[in-house]
Amino acid sequence: MPIAVAGAGYVGLTTAACLCELGHQVTLLEIDVERVARLKRGESPIFEPGLDALLQRHLGRALKVTTDLSEALDGAEMLIACVGTPPTASGAPNLSALWRLLGDLRRQRRSGELTVVVKSTVPPGTNRRAQQRLGAGFAVVSNPEFLREGTAIHDFFHPDRIVVGAAQPAAARQVAALYRGIDAPVVVTGWEEAELIKYASNAFLAVKLSFTNEVAAVADSLGADGLTVLRGVGLDRRIGPHFLAPGPGYGGSCLPKDLAALRWTARRRRVRLDLLPAAERANRRQRQRMLAKLGPVAGKRIAVWGLAFKAGTDDVRESPALEIIPALLAQGARVVAHDPEARRTFAAALTGAGVQREGSASASTGVPPSGAGLPGGFTLVDEMWEAARGADALLVLTEWPEYAAAPPEAIRTALAGDLVVDARNLFDPEAMAAAGLRYRGVGRDRGFHPPA
Ligand code: UGA
């Protein structure tokens, strides 16, 4: 099926490349001229494992890229909107890119019906408004995405479900047919239900993680093994074993944003929500707990392994490192940090350079930032052992495999001090102790009581 995909961010790029893989003809529409030029050269503007190979296979063949809407719509039966909906201070997402796109569509449209699929994450009621704005000749369908950064390609082909929200059964069938060949239940529903499924799913995941982190804190205080506790809890099929790994608190561009947007949606309708603000508070407290595990840091040199909000991405949006590192510096520590992919994006975020992730990501494949504009006392290094060498303590914030593979003896040799705070539980506490390290995990930190 000939399809236009609007927006070459991580959702749009992944969707476009994977739809080609399913046999569709896709034209990717992107307004950023520079990004289009890079794509045309075969360079992916974001770091997403497996995406480069798919782009190379399809670019210039099933996949075309353009900045021109009329070219994208030429012959297309469907347009999939994957434009960004970034958060605003009120919690409401900024929908201006979506409205701009729909306005352009209305002006451009030729004869015949066009199905407009909204994949961008939008508050309940948005698809209905989109249909009103577009009017006759357009069928709006909500089709939220559930892709995780870092495993987006795998998630596209192995989804737990496909959600299609529409007012017209024929349009719903057309969108469901996009995914023919993928084995997953299809939930066909109305617009608001589809929109709310997306928000409720991410909000539930955030609540589950905050709960997990609180159980880990109680286990720490009891000297109990929190990971065994959570495994025992997760074996209950009603709870499930996933999303029960304690850590430094959730981050990324989705969970925090969608939780805030669901709160905003409820507020506007005067529905009181108690659980979601508590989950947000618990997440902030979790960052503080990681700091407390380091103890007093004034005058110390702290090595940080991991800047991305999770492994497999260069994304630092709402990353624990963005809160924890400035807090360490404010307390008078010197910080030497490493990340295999996210050094450039982190430097841009820290200096407030406002470089969009998509705009800077492909350069983050190992090129160190210049260091200009970084706060005093903060150094970014290219190599993980360079960060650890001579540090008083090591703080592990992202679960990159190369960190997990570090031998405890080598960590002991590299550090000047002996404290390792492992916010991702990558290491075996006994092996770390045997190497002469003081080891503090999350839910594996015997008798640890943070200050109230
Ligand atoms: C999340 C959802 O998982 C996707 O289904 C959704 O499509 C996406 O948001 C979105 O709305 O676009 P993502 O933000 O890429 O995906 O990352 P997750 O893998 O869900 O991780 C979120 C955060 O939770 C990360 O900070 C991660 O480190 C943390 N996490 C996750 C834990 O601390 N423990 C866990 O057991 C799992």
Image: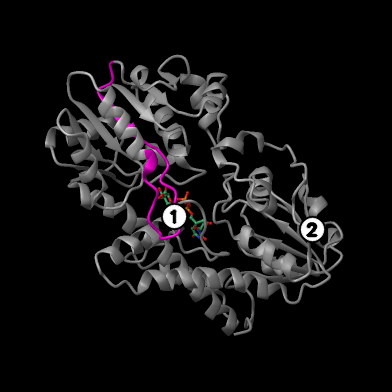
What is the three-letter code of the residue carrying label 1? Answer: Thr
Depth order, front residue of 350/390: 350
272 left or right, relative to 310:
left
Depth order, front residue of 306/367: 367
Residue 132, located in which quarter of the rendered image?
Answer: top left
Quadrant holding the N terminus:
top left
The numbered mark at residue 381 is none
Image height of 230 relative to 64, above or below: below
83 left or right, relative to 316:
left
Extreme-left residue of the structure:
169
Residue at 32% in and 44% down: 144
Residue bearing the label numbered 1: 88
378 left or right, relative to 93:
right
Depth order, front residue of 230/208: 208
Residue bearing the label numbered 2: 376
Q: How far apart are marks 1 and 2 (CA)?
A: 30 Å
Tell me which colouring the rendered structure shows: one colour
Residue 79 forms part of the magenta stretch:
yes
Residue at 62% in and 83% down: 449
| Magenta span of residues | 75-97
Q: Give the image location of residue 336, x and y in percent.
A: 78, 56
Asked if residue 187 shows in the view, the reply is no
Q: Give the image location of residue 115, x and y in percent.
A: 22, 30
Residue 205 forms part of the magenta stretch:
no
Asked if residue 260 shows in the view, the reply is yes
